[in-house]
Image: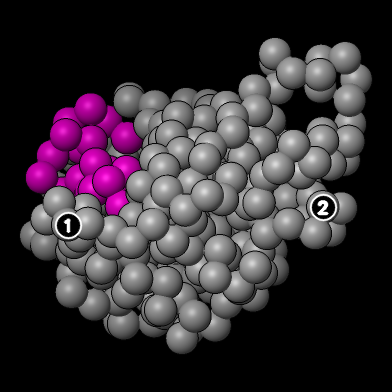
């Protein structure tokens, strides 16, 4: 794997190998075992042009745990404010000595463009409403650790589908590893060309799924929350009580409590949200290691 800019380039065996490796790393981290410094002496640079808490910090820690140096670029205090283009910024960071770039940007395709301009391995950490491949991997790991399998699980991804890069990667990755995915949301946010089933009625599918995956409404990409949305899709204790006993609730974060998910559901034993965050570091370690070995 030279870069990871889209999850769609990975087949089932590639996805399963990365999930296996992430699972092994998670076990090693939990046990406090020594982990080989596969990135020793290399430099990973984070180029985040959009806000982030868990993705950026977990890439930082993942790289450090593998022995890499980490450079963090902050657009608001960088020469981007003086008009430097993405291309010139990426080439500058490359010349400084970065070996691997992690890119988050508001424009779809920006990470792929950076990979082409620099020739460096690039991880897409979110490109506009495009994709977020490592989120899909860490979610698959979280599900597999919880249920002991992925094959045959039924999952509803709920909310602002068309503006969500998380959905953009999940809806390809999860069916590839055997999960039956339904996209659920208001008609205006359901893609016409979705490769999976879609539904505009959350309530009819509640007792039929193993996983409800909630999305934040992407206000920065034009998503609007109105009373009708809240009435039909806000996931509260009432809706949670209609799930099967062993069904779980997931969310990539940041969560907006009281909007797409109630405080009660976020804190309930069904919630895997903390596990998702926890799995971010070993998943990103597995991806960085795969890129480092194929440099
Ligand atoms: C998401 C993102 O930035 O795409 N967050 C994340 O990386 N876990 C989801 C979101 O912002 O809603």
User: 228 and 90: which one is in front?
Assistant: 90
Q: Quadrant of the N terminus?
A: bottom right
Left or right, 234 with reference to 108: left
Left or right, 183 with reference to 220: left
Q: How did the renderer colour the structure?
A: one colour
How many neighbours does mark 2 have within 10 angstroms: few (below 14), some (14-19), or many (20 or more)?
Answer: some
Query: Up-down: is 62 above or below 25?
Result: above
Element at label 1: loop
User: 55 and 239: which one is in front?
Assistant: 55
State whether residue 155 appears in this view.
no
Element at label 2: helix
Which region shows up in magenta?
Answer: 260-279
- On whether residue 272 falls in the magenta region, the answer is yes
Left or right, 10 with reference to 58: right
Query: Up-down: is 260 above or below 246?
Result: above
User: 63 and 268: which one is in front?
Assistant: 63
Q: Position of residue 200 (x, y in %)?
A: 49, 55
- On whether residue 78 falls in the magenta region, the answer is no
**Quadrant position of residue 4:** bottom right
Q: Residue at x 34, y 71 (%)?
A: 21
- Which disc number belongs to residue 118? 2
Judge: label 1 CB < 8 Å from ligand 1: no
- Which disc number belongs to residue 33? 1
Q: Position of residue 239 (x, y in %)?
A: 23, 45
State whether residue 13 appears in this view.
yes
């Amino acid at each position: 794997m030279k870069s990871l800019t889209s999850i769609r380039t990975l087949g089932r065996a590639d996805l399963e190998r990365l999930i296996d490796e992430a699972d092994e790393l998670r076990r090693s981290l939990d046990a406090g075992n020594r982990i080989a410094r596969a990135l020793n002496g290399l430099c990973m640079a984070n180029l985040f042009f959009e806000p982030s808490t868990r993705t950026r910090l977990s890439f930082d820690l993942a790289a450090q745990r593998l022995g890499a140096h980490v450079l963090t670029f902050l657009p608001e205090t960088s020469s981007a404010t003086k008009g430097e283009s993405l291309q010139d910024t990426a080439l500058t960071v490359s010349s400084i000595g970065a070996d691997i770039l992690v890119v988050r940007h508001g424009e779809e395709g920006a990470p792929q463009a950076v990979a082409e301009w620099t020739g460096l391995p690039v991880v897409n950490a979110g490109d506009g409403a495009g994709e977020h491949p490592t989120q899909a991997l860490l979610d698959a790991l979280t599900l597999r650790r919880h249920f002991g399998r992925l094959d045959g699980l039924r999952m509803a991804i709920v909310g602002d589908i068309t503006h969500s890069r998380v959905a953009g990667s999940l809806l390809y990755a999860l069916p590839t590893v055997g999960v039956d995915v339904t996209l659920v949301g208001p008609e205006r946010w359901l893609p016409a060309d979705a490769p999976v089933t879609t539904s505009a009625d959350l309530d009819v599918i509640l007792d039929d799924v193993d996983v409800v995956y909630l999305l934040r409404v992407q206000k920065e990409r034009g998503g609007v929350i109105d009373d009708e949305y809240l009435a039909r899709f806000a996931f509260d204790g009432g809706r949670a009580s209609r799930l099967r006993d062993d069904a779980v609730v997931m969310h990539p974060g940041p969560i907006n409590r009281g909007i797409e998910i109630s405080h009660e559901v976020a804190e309930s034993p069904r919630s895997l949200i903390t596990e998702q965050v926890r799995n971010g570091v070993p998943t990103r370690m597995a991806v960085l290691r795969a890129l480092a070995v194929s440099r």
